[in-house]
Structures are given as structure tokens and as C-alpha cells.
Amino acid sequence: MADHSSLITFSTTLSVAEVMDRIEKILREKNITIFARISHSEAARNAGLTMQDEELIIFGNPKVGTALMIESPAIGIELPLRIIAWKKNQETIVGFQDTDKLVSEYQIETSTDTIRQFKKILTTLVETAIK
């Protein structure tokens, strides 16, 4: 059994592409910058390999991220935010890193409210997309 203890996950009967299309649409509607949408399964096919459907979307708000990285440059390894979706049997699993640990891990003092909002934003985004 894989350890996904640092991921918060949800499941849906929607396909990986449907979920990620919905997430991308919501982000665009909110004018949130999408840095990349990566299809791991397409990359595998291009390399002559097969794997389950899996996509990653990388997004964020440079104004928010920059303020955090000014306070703690090392937090840049965690930014921009990411959501991953993969096919598992007859369902799609959608997940993101649990951001609660970031405040203590990167000694954030002035932007704690911002970091605490990440989990709420990510949860709402995923829940909306899988409805």
C-alpha cells in the first residue's frame, strides 16, 4: 500500500481529463495563473510506455507566492500550488499536498493566514470540480 499521508485526496467517477478540465476552467474564471498542465500518461505513451491516466496542474497567484518567498525563500520548493489526478480502478483520485505543515516547516510568521487559506482554497476547488 502506498503512503499518501501528506496528500489530501478525494475520489470521483469523472475521468482524469474531465476533472482537470473542470479545475482548469475554474482557475481561468478566477484569473488564477496556470503555469502548466502535465499529462504524465501522455509522456509515458510518447516514451513507448503505458500507465494509468494521470495529470498534474500547476497554478498560483504570483503576488501571493512572491510575498511568501520573500519571507522564506525555501518555500519556493512548494510553490506554485499543484493538484494531481490519477485513475485507480473505476475511479479518479484527486489530491494535493496538505499545506498545514508549511507554516512551521518554513518558519512563516507574517503570512500565516495566507498559508492557512491554501487548504481551504484547494479543498473548495477540488470539491467544486468533482461535483
Image (cartoon, rainbow, N blue to C red):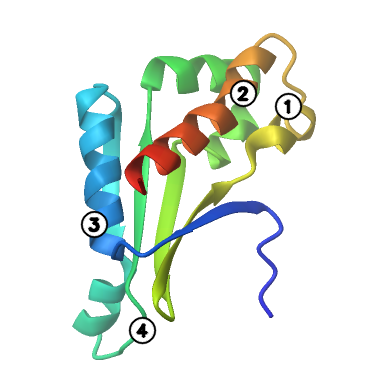
Name the residue carrying label 3. Answer: 18
Cα distance, mark 3 to mark 1? 33 Å
Is residue 123 depicted above or below 111 in this figure?
Answer: below
**Is disc 2 in contact with disc 1, using a CB cutoff of under 8 Å?**
yes
Lower position in the chain sequence, tag 2 or tag 3: 3
> In the visual, does 66 lie left or right of 28?
right
Residue annotated with mark 4: 51
Percent coordinates x, y for residue 15 in the rendering: 28, 65
Task: Give residue 22's quadrant in the image.
Answer: top left
In this rendered view, identify the residue nearer to me: 23 or 79. Answer: 23
Q: Identify the mark nearer the N-term, 3 or 1.
A: 3
Q: CA distance from mark 2 to mark 4?
A: 34 Å
Between label 2 and label 3, give the one nearer the viewer: 3
Circle nearer the viewer, 4 or 3: 3
Q: Secondary structure at mark 1?
A: helix
Q: Local crowd at mark 2 within 10 Å, few (<14), some, or many (≥20)?
A: some
Q: CA distance from mark 4 to mark 1?
A: 35 Å
Residue at disc 4, secondary structure? loop
- Residue at left 36%, top 65%? 13
Circle 1 sits on which residue?
Answer: 103
User: Would you say 83 lies left or right of 47 here?
Assistant: right
Q: Are marks 3 and 1 in contact (CB under 8 Å)?
A: no
The amino acid beneath tag 4 is Met
Instruction: Name the front one of labels 3 and 1.
Output: 3
Q: Is residue 55 above or below residue 64?
A: below
Residue identified by numbered label 2: 115
Q: CA distance from mark 2 to mark 1?
A: 7 Å
- For disc 4, the neighbor class at 10 Å (few under 14, some 14 to 19, many from 20) is few
Q: Amino acid at mark 1?
A: Val
Whichever of callouts 2 and 1 sits on the residue coming sooner in the sequence is: 1
Question: SS of the residue at dot 3?
Answer: helix
- Kindly identify the amino acid type of the residue bearing the numbered disc 3: Glu
